[in-house]
Image (cartoon, rainbow, N blue to C red):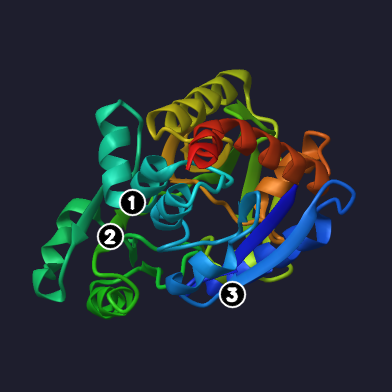
Amino acid sequence: MKVGVIMGGDSSEREVSIRTGQEMLSHLDRNKYEVVPIEISNQHELIDRVKGIDMALLALHGPYGEDGTVQGALESMGIPYTGSGVLSSSICMDKDVAKRLLQSEGIRTTEWRCWSSIEEYDPEVLEILGLPLIVKPNCGGSSVGAELVRSREQLYGAVQNAFQWDSTVMLEEYISGQEITCSLLNGEMLPIIGIRSLQSDWFDYRCKYDDGGAEEQVIQLPAEVKRNVTQAAIACYRIMKCSVYARVDMILRDGVPYVLEVNTLPGMTTNSLLPKSAFAAGLTFSQLLDRIIEQSWSARAHIRSSNKTV
């Protein structure tokens, strides 16, 4: 099978995407796959670069790569790709839409408000969300452009900064508690990982990607808490129509899980959480990639069939 590892793009997460792609390239079994690195700088390069591959292994993050756009382009070309489909990718990338959908299904999530322009800035939002709160791009990832706001004086500058990264900005209630992440493979839970930030008061970009930025390890939760966390994670996977693999990030407050977001293309760098969770389940990085490719090949059977008839 000829597998093209697609990475790069032009989003704020380009650097993380390239690191994910390089990690995938170093662990793909060359006895099973003919591996083709495909680093793109913009969406216009995709069509010519993917010609001839059998499967697109997506290492993209952020807008275009993670919001359903590249997935739709690949479907139109009859090329199977890894991870969730167009609809799921689009919903999960828009944090406001995702939280509305989850809330409507009874999933606990932190309170939030969104602004689509700086003119909508209203400090009275503090009366609703309180302090501290998180300001972040609505369709961003990896905590790029995100900031923990502790005072009224910080708020306007944080909102201005977030608008540099996205056309819609989310202000989100900050709750203290145990941060956890739940990785799912083919709809089944992998071991739960607890996160403790070491370089910041919260899990920001440095903590996520710098060596020694955070302590991340498999944790054992009380039986009832684990059951509630597992039910919430699997429900998110189902509600958001995810497929193959995903990662659900949560905060545990007094044993109660609050869903922060659902990631359809979680990071796969050396410091990333999903590979650590898979390793705890007995899967090497190469075996994890095998599973993702095999399950995606099955999930995209309709694309392969349509391609044969063209």
- Measured as percent of width and height from the top left, residue 210 is found at 67, 71
Tell me if label 1 and label 3 are in contact, CB under 8 Å.
no
Residue at image x 45%, y 57%? 70
Sequence order check, earlier mark of 3 and 2 = 3
Task: Indicate the secondary structure of the residue bearing disc 3.
Answer: helix
Query: Which dot, 3 or 2, sits closer to the camera?
Result: 3
- Measured as percent of width and height from the top left, residue 260 is found at 42, 46
Sequence order check, earlier mark of 1 and 3 = 3
| Cα gap from disc 2 to disc 1, whole angstroms | 8 Å
Q: Nearer the viewer, residue 110 or 309?
A: 309
| Cα gap from disc 1 to disc 3, whole angstroms | 22 Å
Per the image, the residue denoted by label 3 is 15
Q: How many other residues sit within 10 Å of disc 2, few (<14), some (14-19) or many (≥20)? A: many
Residue 217: tell me if it is visible. Answer: no
| Cα gap from disc 3 to disc 2, whole angstroms | 23 Å
Quadrant position of residue 133: bottom left
Disc 2 residue type (three-letter): Met
- Measured as percent of width and height from the top left, residue 86 is found at 40, 45
Residue 250: assigned label: none
Residue 95: assigned label: 1
Residue at image x 82%, y 56%? 27
Q: Nearer the viewer, residue 239 or 231?
A: 239
The outermost residue toward the right is: 31
